[in-house]
């Protein structure tokens, strides 16, 4: 059923090269159309590779520019920058992530005493609502760990406005199952559909739009609420300044990879005394299998670069591993706000108890993009030509 590339950098590069000719006018014209699994021509299918940085954002942008130039590839390039914008937006507003996690826990607790709503949520997750398109997308998500972006928008809209289910539970359903789910893109996209990310502007799934952009595979006429009002919830908080990047430590380091950044080839020059990868938190089967394999692939490439063996370790084993390395510092690529960032922050105290400091290296791409996400995407978008000139993205 799945036509997704394998969770390795090598297979991501193969797909990138194969899709490069379609990054221009084909992508612009066809990116909103989903002909279904096995028939997708005009989307890259590389979102999980970029999310885990098996491929870098700059490699995708550089490939698009090399094949099509900035005008013809404008839509594809913008979509790559959307992920950086979302990450920057949440990075400047970390309280939104804590609020989301609290809202999910609250909604899950409420289901314990709300039998009718619990059954409705379970039916939606199982693809048993009777709305054929929604049910097919729910099953595809669970089976493959991926959905077309337009299907994600339709799904979220139907969940919120037709089924009247709590949006945090839908967002968590996505985060649990999607191979490419990151805290920022997932949380903020659901908020956008609900009309609370850009207050008053929501996204309503319409039967005509679904029929047209699924090429007639689905037509949910008279099944959708196409007149629902946006949710009435507080708007996003004001942006805080981006905390300064942490300096690289002196001397040898224990290098800790994690699922947010698996491109050790582009790390700065380091004296690496030990190598490990942080085991991911449990998720659904397809997402977990992809993440585990991606981590193994990243570890293998890091081992080749630094001449060291490496293992995947749970958070509770990191302090002992670092202490046994003889290094006085652990270095990890800086993750954006989310579960991995929370886990790394929780490691500071046990590492400090061993006399070891934790350092997070911020990529130049993030350092350039994140501070610009203070308002909506359109002001951010105006900076894309300058960001391209500054970052000089090139094909791999």
Image (cartoon, helix red, strand yellow):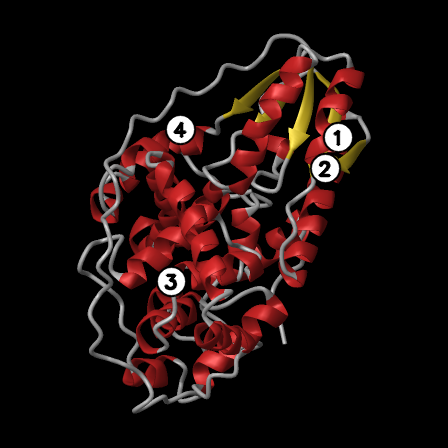
Contact between marks 4 and 1 (CB within 8 A): the answer is no
Q: Secondary structure at mark 4?
A: helix
Q: Quadrant of the N terminus?
A: bottom right
Residue 305, visible in the rendered structure: no
Q: Work out whether residue 143 or residue 99 is closer to the camera in this orientation and state it.
A: 99
Which residue corresponds to mark 4? 367
Which residue corresponds to mark 2? 314
Which residue corresponds to mark 3? 167
| Sooner in the amino-acid sequence: mark 4 or mark 2 | 2
Contact between marks 2 and 3 (CB within 8 A): the answer is no
Would residue 307 appear left or right of 355 to someone viewing this image? right
Give the CA separation, mark 2 to mark 1: 6 Å
Would residue 355 appear left or right of 174 to someone viewing this image? right
Which residue corresponds to mark 1? 317
Assess disc 3: are there few (<14), some (14-19) or many (≥20) residues with their C-alpha within 10 Å of its C-alpha. many
Q: Work out whether residue 153 or residue 10 is closer to the camera in this orientation and state it.
A: 153
């Amino acid at each position: 059923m799945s036509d997704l590339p394998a969770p390795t950098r090598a297979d991501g590069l193969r797909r990138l090269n194969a899709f490069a000719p379609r990054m221009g006018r084909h992508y612009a014209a066809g990116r909103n159309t989903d002909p279904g699994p096995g028939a997708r021509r005009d989307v890259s299918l590389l979102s999980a590779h970029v999310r885990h940085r098996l491929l870098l954002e700059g490699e995708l942008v550089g490939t698009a520019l090399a094949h099509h130039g900035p005008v013809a590839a404008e839509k594809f390039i913008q979509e790559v920058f959307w992920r950086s914008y979302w990450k920057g937006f949440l990075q400047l507003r970390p309280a939104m992530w804590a609020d989301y996690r609290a809202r999910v826990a609250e909604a899950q607790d409420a289901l314990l005493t709300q039998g009718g709503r619990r059954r409705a949520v379970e039916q939606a997750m199982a693809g048993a609502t009777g709305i054929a398109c929604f049910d097919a997308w729910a099953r595809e998500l669970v089976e493959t760990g991926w959905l077309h972006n337009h299907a994600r928008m339709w799904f979220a809209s139907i969940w919120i406005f037709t089924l009247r289910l709590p949006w945090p539970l839908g967002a968590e359903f996505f985060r649990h199952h999607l191979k490419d789910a990151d805290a920022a893109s997932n949380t903020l996209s659901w908020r956008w559909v609900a009309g609370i990310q850009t207050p008053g502007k929501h996204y309503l799934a319409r039967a005509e739009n679904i029929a047209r952009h699924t090429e007639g595979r689905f037509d949910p006429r008279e099944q959708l609420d196409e007149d629902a009002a946006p949710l009435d919830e507080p708007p996003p908080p004001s942006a805080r300044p981006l905390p300064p990047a942490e300096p690289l430590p002196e001397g040898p380091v224990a290098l800790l990879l994690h699922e947010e950044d698996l491109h050790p080839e582009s790390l700065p020059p380091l004296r690496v005394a030990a190598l490990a990868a942080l085991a991911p938190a449990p998720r659904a089967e397809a997402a977990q299998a992809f993440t585990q394999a991606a981590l193994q692939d990243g570890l293998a490439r890091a081992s080749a670069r630094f001449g060291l063996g490496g293992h995947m370790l749970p958070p509770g084993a990191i302090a002992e591993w670092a202490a046994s390395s003889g290094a006085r510092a652990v270095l990890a690529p800086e993750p954006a706000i989310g579960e991995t960032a929370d886990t790394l922050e929780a490691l500071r105290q046990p590492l400090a108890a061993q006399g070891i400091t934790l350092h997070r290296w911020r990529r130049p791409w993030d350092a350039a993009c994140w501070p610009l996400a203070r308002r909506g995407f359109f002001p951010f978008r105006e900076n894309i030509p300058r960001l391209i000139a500054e970052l000089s993205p090139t094909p791999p």
